[in-house]
Image (spheres, rainbow, N blue to C red):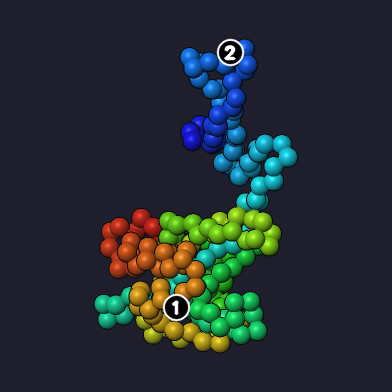
């Protein structure tokens, strides 16, 4: 694959023309072009490909207390999809919202917590939704709150729990979520000069 001016090209072999086919004449190539700025795949005629959407965000809340980092997980209400599972916070990006605005609003709505610091986790959670045949790309954000902040759950959740990294990754359902927790813990959560590069607010 090569990239040029916002485009990615994928080359695949094509049968050589009959009058030129020989061991001295290598196969020519046919190209498929992806416009990376618009996320539109120009695919071969007659071939269906998944849609690509980036209209949700993932948010992870953590706190620093007594030299330890803890992540807040929320347990979804049993009557909802994925009921009973432990999750971070996921939210739809509304029209005229930035991804960061959507993540901050979801944190406040889901937990009642006031955000102290906001970071881009420098990670895109990606997964495939088989029902809509869509590849989902979700920007990930990390937020700090004060150590003694009190959680007030929305109706979507029945419980909350502050976990260290190992406990959080054990409870989370999806591998992308577990990877995000490890990444945030390693590059942002303990603070320091490196974490400042990820600060967005």
Between residues 61 and 32, which one lies in front from this camera angle? 32
Q: From where the camera sits, is residue 75 visible?
A: yes
Between residues 155 and 108, which one lies in front from this camera angle? 155
**Residue that numbered label 1 is attached to:** 171
Q: Quadrant of residue 80?
A: bottom right
Q: Quadrant of residue 142?
A: bottom left
**What is the secondary structure assignment of the residue under circle 2?**
helix
Q: Can you say whether 57 is above or below 40 in the image?
A: below
* Residue 111: x %, y % from top left: 52, 80
**Picture mark count:** 2
Between residues 11 and 110, which one lies in front from this camera angle? 11
**Residue that numbered label 2 is attached to:** 20
* Residue 177: x %, y % from top left: 47, 67
**Is residue 151 shown left or right of residue 136?**
left
Q: From where the camera sits, is residue 142 visible?
A: no
**Is residue 182 shown left or right of residue 17?**
left
Residue lying at 26% horizontally and 77% vertically, measured from the top left: 67
Q: Kindly report the distance in space between the C-alpha atoms of the residues bearing marks 2 and 1.
A: 61 Å
**Is residue 182 shown left or right of residue 24?**
left
Residue lying at 49% horizontally and 68% vertically, measured from the top left: 174
């Amino acid at each position: 694959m090569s990239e040029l001016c916002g485009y990615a090209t994928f080359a695949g072999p094509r049968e050589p023309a009959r009058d030129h086919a020989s061991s001295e004449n290598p196969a020519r190539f046919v190209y498929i072009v992806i416009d990376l700025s618009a996320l539109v795949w120009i695919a071969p005629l007659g071939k269906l490909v998944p849609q690509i959407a980036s209209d949700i965000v993932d948010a992870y809340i953590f706190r620093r207390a007594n030299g330890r980092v803890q992540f807040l997980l929320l347990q979804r209400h049993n009557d909802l999809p994925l009921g009973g599972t432990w999750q971070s916070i996921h939210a739809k990006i509304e029209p005229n919202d930035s991804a960061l605005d959507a993540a901050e609003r979801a944190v406040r709505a889901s937990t009642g917590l006031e955000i102290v610091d906001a970071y881009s986790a420098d990670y895109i959670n990606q997964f495939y939704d088989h029902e809509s045949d869509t590849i989902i790309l979700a920007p990930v954000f990390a937020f700090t709150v004060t150590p003694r902040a009190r959680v007030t759950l929305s109706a979507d959740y029945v419980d909350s729990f502050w976990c260290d990294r190992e406990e959080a990754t054990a409870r989370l359902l999806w591998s992308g979520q577990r990877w995000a927790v490890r990444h945030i813990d390693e590059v942002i959560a303990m603070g320091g000069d490196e974490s400042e590069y990820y600060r967005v607010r």
